[in-house]
Each structure stands twice: as structure tokens, then as C-alpha cells.
Image (spheres, rainbow, N blue to C red):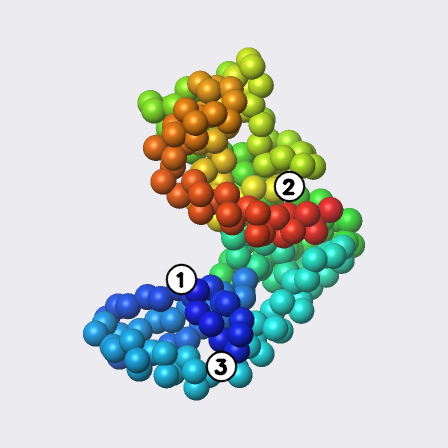
Amino acid sequence: MEILIKDQKISCEYISRKRKTLEIQIQPDGTLRVLAPKGLKKEKVLKTIRDKEDWIVNKIQEINSRAVPGKPEFKEQELHYGFGNARALSFISAPENKKLAVDLKSEGFVLSGRDFHKDRVRSALEEWYRFQTEKRVAYFVKKYRNSLPRPAKIQVKTQKKRWGSCNHKGKVMFNWKLSMAPAWVLEYLVVHELSHIEEFNHSKNFWALVRKTCPRCDEARDWLKKNQWKFQRFD
């Protein structure tokens, strides 16, 4: 859902569960998360948010200032996107590692190695993205093997202007940057391209098949339109 704070529409995730206190969090991607005790009145939640408006706006502006579109420098604390959320880079010296190792932890991307030149950092991140995208594409293709046509071949590659594509021979291709997006968005794109094997067009029949298989189809398309700059700034 969205909430209006000082004339700004801010995405807000509201979670009600068994807990004693109300907590407001600002996520790394600049969205708001509210953790509320079960049964707490909506008026109380809104009042708490209003009381913290200045803090919320300042924190979101701070995050946005670090994640503006532009050419990245691949330095520590710079934000890059993984599975839909902004993740800060951190470096750990490991002289025994000839090659930079990348690990995604709760605090962000952790890179360990001996040389953190920006070209090496970029290359290591790209390799991580490719691997994660390949793994998740394979998972979703398997998930829909009984409900959608099976591809003749799957390839994860560099695609400047496309998230994915499909040819007449049933070969499907996906942009390696898709692991920057939430898993449910990547899932939609897999469904989209597999559906093209049956309906090689964007007809009503095609979209009916996609929406039948992926109920969050329209939400995923909207997410991609709004967030495509997060993919493009990596180049």
C-alpha cells in the first residue's frame, strides 16, 4: 500500500503480528515497513507515523541520495540492488583469495579478496548476478514444466533493452540483471517467455495465458517500468 507523508507517496508494508510494541522501519530501498501488535487501532498507527514524519522523510532522502541514477563507482557503501532491495557494498581483506568472492548477507553485499579495484568489483558482482539469475530461472522453468511449454534451450545473457526474449525454435533468453529484481518479478518474466512458446505474439490469448499462470503479472510489469533505472545504472 501507499501512504502520503509530506506530499510524498511512500510505499508501505504493514505487518500485524504478536508483539508488544509498534515499530517503524525504513528499508534499504526507501520503503516503509510498519510492525504492529495485533489488534492495534489504525488511528494509533497513523498517529505514530505522523509523529515521525520528519525522521521518515530524512531517512528516505538519505537513502535516495546514495542510490541516484548515474554511473556507479563500485566503492564501499555504494548501493546496488539484489532481489529488489538496495544493498550496500562492504569489503573484507582476504589476501589468500585471488578472485573476489561475493556473498549477500543481511547487511548487504560482502566482497572478500585482495584487490578491490572498481573493475574487479564490477566483474565479481556481474558474475554473482549471472549465477543467481541462472539458478532462479531454472527453478521457475521447472516449477511450470507441467503447465507451460518447455523451452528448447535456456540462456542468460547480456540484453541491453530486453528483460527476456523467445525465438521460434523455443529458445528463451533472459537478462542477467534480473536477480536485481524481486523473485516474483523474475518469476513473471519466466512465465512471460515460456508463454511465448505457445503464443508467439502479444495477443489477448497470450496475456490470458500469462495472467492465468501469474496473477501478479500486471504488478510485475508496473514494477519493471518504475525500477528499470536500477538495472541500467550498473553499466
Would you call the spot at circle 2 few (<14 residues within 10 Å), some (14-19), or many (20 or more)? some
Is label 2 or label 1 in front? 1
- Position of residue 140 relative to residue 203, above or below, is below
Q: Amino acid at mark 3?
A: Glu
Residue visible at 49% across and 40% down in the picture: 186
- The circle drawn on residue 53 is 3
Question: What residue is rendered at 68% in x and 62% in y?
Answer: 68
* Numbered disc 1: secondary structure: loop
Q: Residue shown at 40%/43% (left/top)?
A: 216
The residue sitting at the bottom extreme is: 51
Which x, y percent locates residue 143? 37, 31
| Amino acid under disc 2 | Glu
Checking the image for residue 30, the label placed there is none
Residue 18 pos. (x, y %)? 23, 71
* Label 2 to label 1: alpha-carbon separation: 34 Å
Q: Which residue is mark 2?
A: 127
**Alpha carbon distance from label 3 to label 1:** 17 Å
